[in-house]
Amino acid sequence: DMLFTQGNDITRLQCAFVDTPEVAKITEFIGSQRAYPEAHLLPEYVGDDSGTGIDYDIADRDAMFREAAEVIVNAQQGSASLIQRKLKLGYNRAGRIIDQLEAAGIVGPFEGSKARQVLVSDIYALDQLLSNEIK
């Protein structure tokens, strides 16, 4: 039992009580049903290799990609406006760089008006991530 208040009205809510012997009878009945001769196995989910839905080519990266990545990692805040201010770029170019940073695994996905989560902790980790991509 519980009381639910909505404005000035209070409503009493109740739910059905199912006792343990009743649950045992139901599970016994379901368990006694005829089953399939073999279990049906669902196929395993195979996700993307990169983990993001963005396709990119390392050769197509912006010339300011590395500098933008360093700015984002140092500030630990992933936003196009930060790249615009620090690197004196336009919004469209900064937005494309943010998309490239997401595809590279440096920042997380878009979260509305909040800044993106930075997935790389420091410059050393950034260097390792970018050098592993080249190999």
Image (tube, helix red, strand yellow):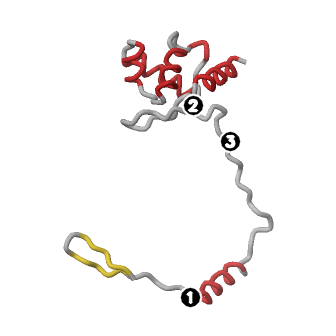
Q: Which residue is denoted by mark 3 in the rendering?
A: 46
Q: Quick check: 107 above or below 33?
A: above
Name the quadrant containing residue 123: top right
Q: Quick check: 91 above or below 4?
A: above
Tell me the SS state at disc 2.
Answer: loop
Q: Which residue is denoted by mark 2 in the rendering?
A: 121
**Residue at x-position 67% and y-position 33%:** 49
Q: Earlier in the sequence, mark 2 or mark 1?
A: 1
Q: Quick check: 108 above or below 5?
A: above
Compare residues 115 and 9 and report the one nearer the observer: 115
**Residue at x-position 37% and y-position 80%:** 2
Name the quadrant containing residue 113: top left
Q: Earlier in the sequence, mark 2 or mark 3?
A: 3
Please state which of the two labelled residues, at mark 2 or mark 1, is closer to the viewer: 2
Residue 66 in the image: state x and y as whole percent: 55, 15
Residue 127 in the image: state x and y as whole percent: 63, 20
Compare residues 100 and 46 and report the one nearer the observer: 100
**Residue, far right:** 37
**Residue, far top:** 63
Tell me the SS state at disc 1.
Answer: loop
Q: Which residue is denoted by mark 1 in the rendering?
A: 19
Please state which of the two labelled residues, at mark 2 or mark 3, is closer to the viewer: 2
Circle 3: residue type: Val
Circle 1: residue type: Asp
- Label 2 CA crowd tier, 10 Å (few <14, some 14–19, many 20+): few
Residue 89 in the image: state x and y as whole percent: 39, 13
Report, in whole angstroms, how far the alpha carbon at label 2 lies from the one at label 3.
28 Å
Asked whether, in this view, residue 119 is left or right of residue 81, the answer is right
Q: In which quarter of the image is the C terminus?
A: top right
Please state which of the two labelled residues, at mark 1 or mark 3, is closer to the viewer: 1
